[in-house]
Amino acid sequence: MGGVEEDILQLNEKTLWTGGPGAREGYDYGVPPAGDQVAAYRQVQQRLNAQGSLSPEDAAELMGREMKGYGHYQNFGYLRLILAGEEEEAQEEVSDYRRELDLTNAVARISYRRGSVEYHREYFYSYPDGVLVMRLSANERGQIHLRAQLELPDNRSREYQLKNKRLRVNGHLHDNGLAFEAQLALQAEGGELYTPADSELPQLAVRGADSVTLVLAAGTDYAQRYPHYRGAHPHARLTRTLDAALTYTPDVLYSRHQEDYQALFGRVALHLQGVMPAIPTPMLLANYGSDSAADRALEQLYFQFGRYLLISASREGSLSANLQGVWNHSATPPWNADYHVNINLQMNYWPALVTNLAETTGPLYDFIDSLVEPGRVSAKKLTGASGWTLFLNTNIWGFTGVIAWPTAFWQPEAGAWLMQHYYQHYLFTGDKKFLRERGYPVMQDAARFWLDALVTDPRDGKLVVSPSFSPEYGNFTRGAAMSQQIVHELFTYTLAAAQKLGDQDFAEQLRPALAQLDPGLRIGRWGQLQEWKEDLDEADNQHRHVSHLYALHPGEQIVVSRDQELARAAQVSLNARGDGGTGWSQAWKINLWARLQEGERAHQLLSEQLKHSTLPNLWGTHPPFQIDGNFGATAGIAEMLLQSHAGRLHLLPALPSAWSQGEISGLRARGNITVDLIWDGGKLTRARLHTGSAGDILLNGRYRITHKDAELTVRHNKADTLFTAQAEQTYILHPLAKQSIHH
Ligand code: FUC
């Protein structure tokens, strides 16, 4: 929190959750322990066939269930640093206070002056070492006085131990017995270590030091394994982690952290002609919309902040980013700070591939993989289908059932929606091994669920999802647009994967189903893309979910250059929904307008989001704080500058006039391509493509292409350019002027 007399660091560890197996009130993964719910599900299907629709309340009455032992993501606790020095020093005024988060280095810094002494504090988390490192120093010797203590919320037991300059606290959550531990080590240069006599909690203490380094490791006995989710007590692991970290000097720890972090963060640079004024960030945000150079600086910062947040919230070996990333100070956070899968978890990972952070996706795939087993039980017990699925929300304990909240509880397409991430990973990286070993097995099992669960619509003989609900609005019906679009995408991707991997049998199962599937694309009476199979849309409905536009983004069923009528209908719907909404809703709309190639509107939505859905520290807000808005908007900014869906590379597809001059480097495109762009006067001046794999590249626009200074033979077709790239090569693109297109 950056105080002068006292600083408080609020700590989080993503596996510290109440609920789950061992929860006091009992836990059943969201499915009834005995019997099944299939009869209720069939009854809803029959009622829909008989009467066409059913209120969400009636559907929830029949199929919903109370959540039991679901749990909440927890605050780990607080590290309090008591920094007050000797009496006479405390009299002196503090000046030149500065607190910063340095995104380039992922370091938080605090500095100030008191009398003649300049104080510095530096905090970072080293991923390669698994520790939080805190350095306190001053420009004069003997000036650092520090007492450090660890404070924990009430809902757990605790035991402290102070030994060999190390403070250890461990205990169990009262609710589920989850074991946790933190170990804090202190190293001082100069000064005198002592044991304060007057403190309530055990403290590590030093007075008169030249500098102090604190190193902290924390963990729990959570293991991501159904059904028990518990592993070894963290004590031995944390002791090893901390011992290993302490073999390095603070400088070495810092450079290890920096090397690791910058290898990811440093891949993408964005310049929008921004000039950063020397004012605090909350003021920069408050002034947004008044000064163009400062506005551009905020937009650049906000884009990179999203990448910083994703790197910080989602590294291999840990859980995926939740509704608050990792950052939660409450024992009962909003929506349990869980994983909602009717937009939120997916949106968290939208920027991962395109902004060159593929390494952050491991936790998502591990998490999804861990849901397959419980998701099979839920599928069977709740719908009678094989394969796996989940519904609206999930936790770290394999919750894959339904809840009793009428307006959102039913979303069995959630599992299918997550499959998009595996296939897109393959499209971006070209990694066939990943597709074979990680993606395809899970996709196939999700497709199995839908092969079983789809029903024939008596109205037209098409395969539809029933019961189907459009998050989070309207009645239960058969074949709502989003349900159909998602299942259509799943079958399309799984079929493509089956063909690539030579699984003819499964391809043969999918092909007829895909042919009979209602694709969920209809244009309604006021020119809108229909949200339901029947033309029920109301033009004044400004609901935050724009579910039926899934086909435009994040899906790729509607491609502007190919499907003009559907794209127009999507635009009509999007206009009707308006530019408002919660953080994630506005972030989604940036992406949707970008896909419609409407740069001005995309930028307007970004502005709306910065003005209305962003907190002073630049966190997204629903309200309250929810991280998906940050991630969705970061992806949206990338989507404005580069698109590569539907087999075509589109450079600057939605450039707004506010960004008439700029540069971006290091974005990733599908096909394993790294893209750098430079533009001026609202037009591309030069692009550079680095290809990781060989293959044909279809570009939107006409270009002259050079490779190793020689001009390449390309094919121009209407407004496209096609060329064959070799692996690991760099191509320079020069846009051809309009007149040369017509000669
Ligand atoms: C979905 C949204 C809500 C919220 C919640 C966490 O249900 O409709 O707005 O974001 O997830």
Image: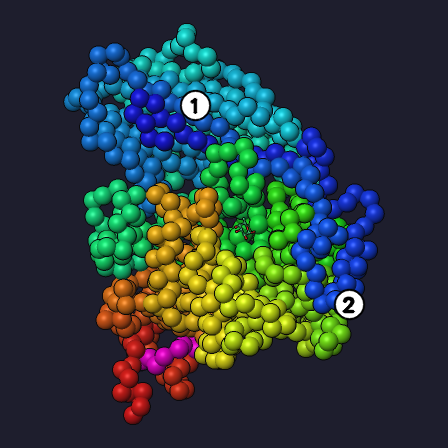
Question: Relative to residue 168, is residue 260 depicted above or below?
Answer: below
Is residue 4 within the magenta segment? no
Q: Residue at x 65, y 39 (%)?
A: 70
Across and down, in percent, residue 88 comes to 22, 12
**Separation of marks 1 and 2 at Cα, in angstroms:** 68 Å
Q: What's drawn in magenta, residue-wise?
A: 694-704
Query: Relative to the observer, which residue lies in front, 172 or 195?
Result: 172
Neighbor class of circle 1 (other Cα within 10 Å; few <14, some 14-19, many 20+) is many
Task: Let me know if residue 636 appears in the view.
Answer: yes
Quadrant into which the N terminus falls: top left
Is residue 703 within the magenta segment? yes
Q: Residue at x 51, y 77 (%)?
A: 527
Residue marked by disc 1: 185
Q: Nearer the viewer, mark 1 or mark 2?
A: 2
Q: Which mark is residue 127?
A: none
Determine whether the residue tagged by mark 1 lies in a helix, strand or loop. strand
Across and down, in percent, residue 67 comes to 68, 42
Across and down, in percent, residue 484 comes to 63, 68
Quadrant position of residue 714: bottom left
Q: Residue at x 59, y 21 (%)?
A: 157
The colouring scheme, among rainbow, by chain, secondary structure or one colour, is rainbow
Across and down, in percent, residue 419 comes to 60, 60
Name the chief secondary structure element in magenta.
strand
Inspect the image, locate mark 2, and give the three-letter code of the amino acid beneath it: Ala
Residue marked by disc 2: 50
Lower sequence index among marks 1 and 2 = 2
